[in-house]
Amino acid sequence: MPELPEVETVCLALSKIVNNSKVRNVKIIRKDLRWNIKKNFEVELTKKILRKPYRRGKYILIPTSKENILLIHLGMSGQIKIKANQNIHSKHDHLIITIENEENNIFSITYNDPRRFGYIDLFHVKEIKNHFLLKKLGVEPFANDFTLDYLQRKIFKKSKCVKNFLMDQSIIAGIGNIYASEILYRANINPLRSVDSLNKENLKSIIDSTKYILKKSINVGGTTLRNHLQPDGKLGYFTQKLQVYGKNKTNCKKCNSQISIVKISNRSTYFCRNCQT
């Protein structure tokens, strides 16, 4: 599943063409995604002006000139394809939005999703705090309120393992399976460890490692995993620089011990039993 860095990469790519662009046409090829695309979606979006996209957790949000917000969720296998002067659809394309930017250039923004676990929505800006996908999201990893005090309050009287804690979207928005493993490896914390056993130094290390790992991956274009491509069609390359995820039976780069793999909530989790305590 695309995580925060991948979604941020898509958002940044969209920002290059979408800001102040006019929607010329909307074509729904298949509306039955994880949830059906709403009726009148095409009518409500066509001829509207799109503003600068931004990210919330794993969601892309694009405000419009009529105080609506276009939401894009990539789900498990979704991707956005950006093409110039083209609106021909191919296999697994479900939605094509044709826009004209301020320089009168025409682009098509295509949502492609083989597994159809993603979602496209359009809603009024007043609904954003109560939107069913957004209302329970926790703090953003790069926000000023992602602090030691915040984490201390969130771990109070909780016994869940730290890996699941990091992936809980109601606590920290945007972290998934890949980056949770990478963050904990850099922080030298065992993913099976209970959060109520973490001290101040552990929590500070988690905050520092979270920002470092996510920023690094965004800078290199996001991790390419399975079906996820960058919008321009180029494969990301951060996968080549992952330190622990997918490295089962290879040697730890810190201590030369063998990397282990365990299942946590049915998700593969990679870590070094020697370094991560």
Image (cartoon, helix red, strand yellow):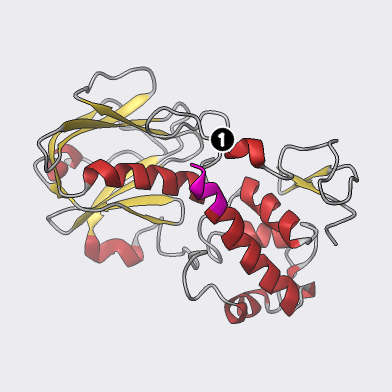
Majority secondary structure of magenta residues:
helix
Mark 1 is on which residue type? Tyr
Name which residue lies at 65% across and 53% down.
180
Does any portion of residue 26 appear in the rendered image?
no
Name which residue lies at 33% across and 17% down.
90
> Where is the N terminus found, in terms of image quarters?
top right
Q: Quadrant of residue 162?
A: bottom right
Disc 1 crowd, CA 10 A, few/some/many (<14, 14-19, 20+): some
| Residue 27, x across and y down, in percent | 20, 29
Drawn side of residue 165 relative to residue 62, left or right? right
| Residue 11, x across and y down, in percent | 36, 47
Drawn side of residue 221 relative to residue 40, left or right? right
Front residue of 103 and 247: 103
Residue 219: in magenta span: yes
Residue 94: in magenta span: no
Above or below: residue 196 compared with residue 83: below
Drawn side of residue 145 relative to residue 127, left or right? right
Name which residue lies at 53% across and 72% down.
146
Q: How many numbered marks does the figure carry?
A: 1
Q: Secondary structure at mark 1?
A: loop
Above or below: residue 60 compared with residue 199: above
Above or below: residue 135 compared with residue 261: below
Q: Quadrant of residue 260?
A: top right
Does any portion of residue 149 appear in the rendered image?
yes
Residue range (magenta)? 216-221
Question: What residue is pinned by disc 1?
Answer: 237
Drawn side of residue 101 relative to residue 241, left or right? left
| Residue 275, x across and y down, in percent | 85, 56
> Where is the C terminus found, in terms of image quarters?
bottom right
